[in-house]
Image (cartoon, rainbow, N blue to C red):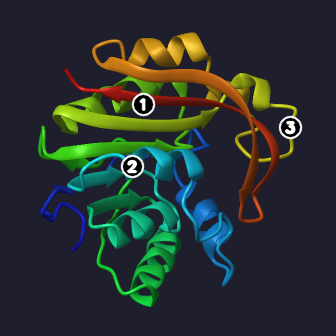
């Protein structure tokens, strides 16, 4: 469906522009170029924190914003989740749909950015934000919209790079404003019950672009 078309869980409207690591419109072309390879640049296996936390939840409706090539979406669908995912990159969407077909599962994957996606309030059992980085002037708005999409009692799963990641070569934005301050990020989700929240040094092995020691925040929270 095209711009402005209603989807089963959401739609997107023209006139907005936001992505994971850039402030300016038109950067979706950069992500299309990055994803336009046969290789899955972040791998085809799920993020380990996401997988560990999703395993303990009862399967239901899952939202994956800025999902990229579909590794988390496809893994969740294989385990009975009804998955809605979105990304601004059409190349990412095509690769995600190909991976889903190869693994014989169905996912709903939309082309939209973080601000333009609109879903039905309180319609998802879980939302996972895995390395979803954005400008600070939009961050709280986007995080609030994710909270609104969760059902009461729904779970949010998050892993993202901290500002301490900047000198590392294991992945993430090279603009410090797009990296997270642990205290500020916790404040964004203050209306939720924080279940787990900590700063970790981890060894990433996620495709060719997430490799090596990284500084991350890991969080799970429940909507009250």
Residue name at image x 51 percent, y 78 percent: 95
Q: Is residue 135 placed above or below 84 in the rendered structure?
A: above
Decide which of tag 3 and tag 1 comes sooner along the chain.
3
| Residue 43 visible in image | yes
Instruction: Using the rendered view, name the quadrant where residue 192 is placed.
Output: top left
Total tally of numbered discs in the picture: 3
Q: Quadrant of the C terminus?
A: top left
Return the disc, 3 or 2, that comes first in the chain's sequence.
2
Which disc, if any, is residue 168? 3
Dividing the picture into quarters, in which one does residue 126 lie? top left
Tag 2 secondary structure: helix
- Which residue matches tag 1? 220
Residue 99's disc is: none
Is any atom of residue 13 visible in this view? no
Graded by Cα atoms within 10 Å as few (under 14), some (14 to 19) or many (20 or more), the crowding at tag 1 reads: many
Q: Position of residue 198 (x, y in %)?
A: 59, 21
SS class, disc 1: strand
For image coordinates 69% across by 28% down, the residue present is 200
Judge depth for marks 3 and 2 and give the one in front: 2
Q: Which quadrant, please, contains the N terminus?
A: bottom left
Among the 4 quarters of the image, the one containing residue 160: top right
Q: Are marks 3 and 2 in contact (CB under 8 Å)?
A: no
Are discs 2 and 1 less than 8 Å apart at CB?
no
User: Percent position (x, y) of residue 6?
Assistant: 12, 62
Horizontally, residue 64 falls left or right of residue 197, namely left
Alpha carbon distance from label 3 to label 1: 25 Å
User: Which of the two labelled residues, at mark 2 and mark 1, occupies the earlier sequence position?
Assistant: 2
Q: Which residue was labeled with disc 2?
A: 54
Residue drawn where x is 51% and y is 70% of the image: 92
Mark 3 in CB contact with mark 1 (< 8 angstroms): no
Residue 204, image x, y percentages? 74, 50
């Amino acid at each position: 469906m095209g711009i402005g078309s209603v989807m089963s869980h959401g739609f997107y409207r023209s006139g907005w522009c936001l992505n994971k690591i850039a402030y300016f419109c038109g950067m979706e072309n950069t992500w299309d170029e990055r994803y336009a390879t046969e290789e899955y640049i972040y791998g085809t296996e799920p993020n380990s924190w996401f997988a560990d936390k999703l395993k303990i939840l009862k399967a239901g409706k899952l939202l994956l914003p800025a999902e990229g090539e579909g590794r988390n979406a496809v893994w969740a669908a294989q385990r009975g989740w009804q998955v809605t995912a979105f990304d601004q990159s059409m190349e990412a969407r095509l690769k995600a749909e190909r991976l889903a077909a190869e693994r014989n599962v169905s996912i709903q994957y939309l082309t939209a950015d973080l601000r333009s996606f609109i879903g039905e309030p309180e319609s998802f059992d879980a939302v996972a934000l895995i390395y979803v980085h954005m400008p600070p002037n939009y961050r709280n708005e986007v995080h609030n919209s994710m909270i609104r999409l969760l059902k009461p009692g729904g779970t949010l799963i998050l892993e993202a790079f901290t500002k301490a990641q900047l000198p590392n070569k294991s992945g993430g934005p090279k603009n410090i404003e797009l990296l997270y301050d642990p205290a500020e990020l916790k404040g964004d989700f203050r209306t939720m019950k924080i279940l787990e929240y900590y700063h970790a040094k981890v060894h990433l092995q996620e495709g060719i672009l997430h490799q090596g020691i990284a500084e991350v925040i890991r969080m799970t929270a429940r909507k009250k």
